[in-house]
Image (tube, rainbow, N blue to C red):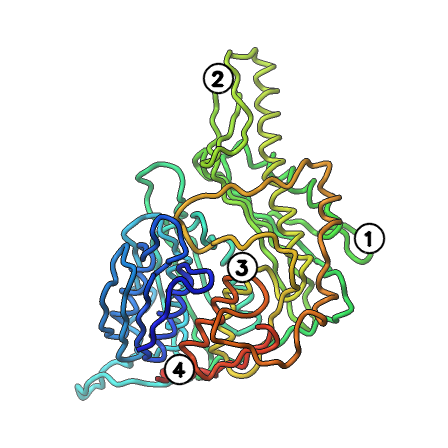
Amino acid sequence: MLELDGRTGEGGGQLVRIATALASLTGQPIRVINVRGNRRFGGGLKAQHVTAIDWLAAATHATVSGVEKGSRTFTFKPKHVLLPHNTSPGNPIELRAATAAASTSLMLQAVLPYLLFARPWTPPSAAGAAAVETTAPAPAPVSIDLYGGTHVSFAPTYDYLDQVLFPTLERWFGVRVERDLVQAGWGTGPAHAAAGLVRLAVHPPTGATLVPKVPSLLVNKNDSVTVIASIDATVLAPADLLDPLADALAQDVAKCALLSPVSDGAMVDLQFARMEASGHDSRVYVLLVARTAEGGVDGVRFWGRDYLGTETIKRTGAGTVKSKGKKGGKGNKSRTSAPERGEAEESAASGFGMLCGRIARRVVLDLADEVAHGGCGDSYLQDQLVVFQALAAGQTSYWRGEGGHKEDTPKDEDEGDVEKEEHGPVAGLQEAVEQLTLHEGEKGETKDEGAADDMTVPFGQGSLHASTARWVTAQVLPNVRWSSNGTVCEGVGWTRGAK
């Protein structure tokens, strides 16, 4: 049995999800100790981990122990690699966590590799023979409904999956995921809000193995700046904040030289992909997605950065506004006396403007920092691609520029809320962007081309999540090979139904 220490690397839930997903495919028994041992408040399995592991255990007829909320050690011994029979849009797989805010995207991370590579059942023959296994090259899509949080702290949101991860998987790996957000599920708002619902149809690879469509990023190493062709914005907020947020985003994108100008001097195309009222004053979400142009040898590349509000917008008196973060975020203080009508309207507009400006600055600068790295895309995308690189056939290379990314936020843990550091006044936006190091032209000096990586410890460039993800794949898939500081992967070419 393979034993993994849950304190290794980033020491959170990502290790649990990848290890269990790969164990389900390979049949490798695993024991994870010190589960989420680097997390505050004691670690242990959370509701979303338990739900995903329970489903994988049922699908693989695994023998398990310790799979319960709060458990710090669990074992998982799978027996076969078969999908549940008779899955269809009318009879989907269901994953429903015990808590309404458990992240749907994190549950999906744990089961998606299995959905892609497990063998489907064929129905019993007319003669009444027992069901048999098949390795048909083009199996039907697998329908799955995920109930839980779609916009919760420390997890990719549905919108990020929809606009960044899923398009990348389809363009680079040929993995197509049809999706529908039936109901949003928020981590803030009424205490007894209903769980969200994400409905997916996952299309397994057309062949028996996963063959990358874009096996390597061949961006010219002399190019110091990535040229952005368009930026899509998603804004979910109280109805009276939608327009102020849209205006603030447009203004700050226009001021950011790294994001806005294109080669002919025209402004980049900023589109609002989705603007909807969130239904509650504590629900504010903004996502910016930058993308390169169609038709390049590297395919379209995506960078996404978002803001999920921890601030409750409180309306005090006749239109005044204040905001308060869970960790004492700075807000516009309410007035102690009711203002006159005209003064109230001006006060509310000013309060909204300050709050929206602060949110817009944060997201724009975070996105500019990501784009400055060049390479495959944003830091969160890089670590989510690791498991697909490891399972794919042949060599892939999806790197990011070194340095510059200011933090390695534990985006896969919904156990607290840390207010990000402010980036400074709007007057300093351009100065801050100009100070970002442009690393794309330096990458040839930061990686040792062809050198095999030490896979006994977390390794490679990028975030701690990315280096930990690579380490987990190397433990469960002994034939995977990583080199050049984690930027090159020789995948195992996993075959559907293999074990």
Pair 1/3: label in front? 3
Q: CA distance from mark 2 to mark 3?
A: 41 Å
Q: Earlier in the sequence, mark 1 or mark 4?
A: 1
Q: CA distance from mark 2 to mark 4?
A: 62 Å
In this orientation, which residue lies closer to the viewer: 171 or 413?
413
Residue of label 2: 317
Q: Earlier in the sequence, mark 2 or mark 4?
A: 2
Local crowd at mark 4 within 10 Å, few (<14), some, or many (≥20)? Answer: many
Q: Are marks 1 and 2 in contact (CB under 8 Å)?
A: no
Q: Secondary structure at mark 2?
A: loop
Pair 2/3: label in front? 3
Residue of label 3: 380
Q: Are marks 2 and 4 in contact (CB under 8 Å)?
A: no
Q: Are marks 1 and 3 in contact (CB under 8 Å)?
A: no
Residue of label 4: 496
Q: Amino acid at mark 4?
A: Arg
Pair 4/3: label in front? 3
Q: Amino acid at mark 3?
A: Tyr
